Image (cartoon, rainbow, N blue to C red):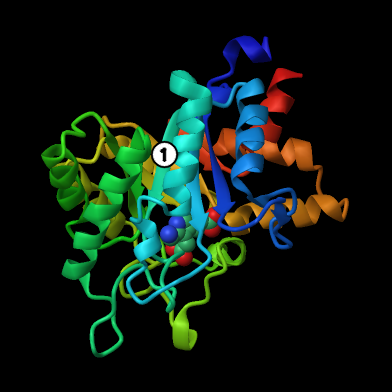
Amino acid sequence: MRRLVAETTLTPNDFILPLFVREGIDEPVPIASLPGVDQHSRASLVDAVADAVAVGVNAVVLFGVPLEKDERGSGAWDPAGIVQLALADLRDRFGDEIVLMGDLCVDEYTSHGHCGVLNDRGEVDNDPTIELYQQIAIAQATAGADVVAPSGMMDGQVAAIRSALDGDGFTDVSILAYAAKYASSMYGPFRDAVDVTIADGGDRKGYQQDFRNSREALEEVHLDIIEGADMVMVKPATLYLDVVSQVRAETRLPVAAYHVSGEYAMLKAAAANGWIDGDLATIETLTAIKRAGADMTLTYLATDASRLLNS
Ligand code: PBG
C-alpha cells in the first residue's frame, strides 16, 4: 500500500554522475575528503562509466584536472585538454547510450583558482571571461558533449555560450545552467578533487550567490531562461531545498540540483562512524531532493544509489 501511494519514486534515470579526470596519471588517485571518489585516468574513467551504466545511470558530467595551470585557464578549451580527450573517449566507447556533459568553467585550469580572468585589481572580469567560456563550449561540443554546464556564474554566460554554439553549428548541444549557485562552504572536498586553492584566501562571493537570499536565486534562474538555458540547476541541494521547490514552481524547464561534495562528505563521514545508516541516508537524501522538485540530481552517490535501488 505504501508503494502504491508513494508520491516520489527514485530511479537511476534521475542521476547525473560527476567524474574527475586527471591528466598524466595511469592509475586512479583516491580523494581523501571524498571517500569512494577518485581522480580518474582516461582508462579508469571509462571503467567507472561502464560500472555506472551497468546499474542504469545514463548521464555523467566531467571535471578536468590539468597538469599545468595558467592565468587564463587555457587547458579548459585546448582541443587536447584532458576533458576534451575524455569526452571523446566516452563518446567512442558508449555512443548514444549515455548523455555526456562537460562542466564549463576555468577554475580547475587557472593558477589563481578563480572562475574567470582577473583584472588589474585582482577581481574576476566578467566580459573577457565569457569569451573564454564560448571557446570552452565549442571545444567540449567538438569533443562530443551533448550538454555543456556553465558553472562560473558570470552575467550573460548562457546567452554568449548559446550564440557561440549556434554559430558553429552545434544547435542541438544543450545548456544546463548552474543558475542558482551559492557561495557555499560545501565545496571544500571538490576543491581537493580538482586541486584548486583560491589565491590570497579569496572566495567566490563576487559571482556566486549569498546564502541569505532566495528571491535573488529566482532572478538568476529567470535571466538564464531568457538567455536560452535548456535546464536550470540549484546548487548545493539539501541546504537549498526551499530554492529547488521555488524554482520548480517558477519554470516548466527541467530542474536539476547538485548534491555537492561537502553534502556527500558529511553523509559518508557519519556513515563511516556508524552514526547514521549510509544506505538509508543515501536514499532518503536523494528522494528528498526529488520530492522538492528536482527532475535530476548531480550526485557522487549515483552508482551506489542505483545499486541500492536495483537490489
Ligand atoms: C566550479 C565548480 C565548483 C563545483 C562544481 N563546479 C566549485 C566552486 O564553485 O568552487 C563544486 C561541486 C562540488 O562541491 O561537488 N567549476
Q: Is residue 307 left or right of residue 215?
A: right
Q: Which quadrant holds residue 262?
A: bottom right
Nearer to the camera, 166 or 247: 166
The spot of residue 310 in percent (x, y) is 71, 19
Per the image, label 1 sits on a secondary structure element best described as strand
The spot of residue 16 in percent (x, y) is 51, 36
Q: Is residue 277 left or right of residue 20?
A: right
Q: Residue at x 49, y 69 (%)?
A: 68
Q: Is residue 112 left or right of residue 28?
A: left
Is residue 294 visible to us here?
A: no
The spot of residue 24 in percent (x, y) is 60, 58
Q: Residue at x 63, y 28 (%)?
A: 50
Q: Residue at x 22, y 75 (%)?
A: 125
Residue 263 in the image: above or below residue 297: below
Nearer to the camera, 104 or 207: 104
Residue 39 in the image: above or below residue 186: above
The spot of residue 75 in percent (x, y) is 40, 61
For the N terminus, the image quarter is top right
Q: Which residue is mark 1?
A: 101
Is residue 163 visible to us here?
A: yes
Residue 291 in the image: above or below residue 84: above
Nearer to the camera, 48 or 177: 48
Q: Which quadrant holds residue 176?
A: top left
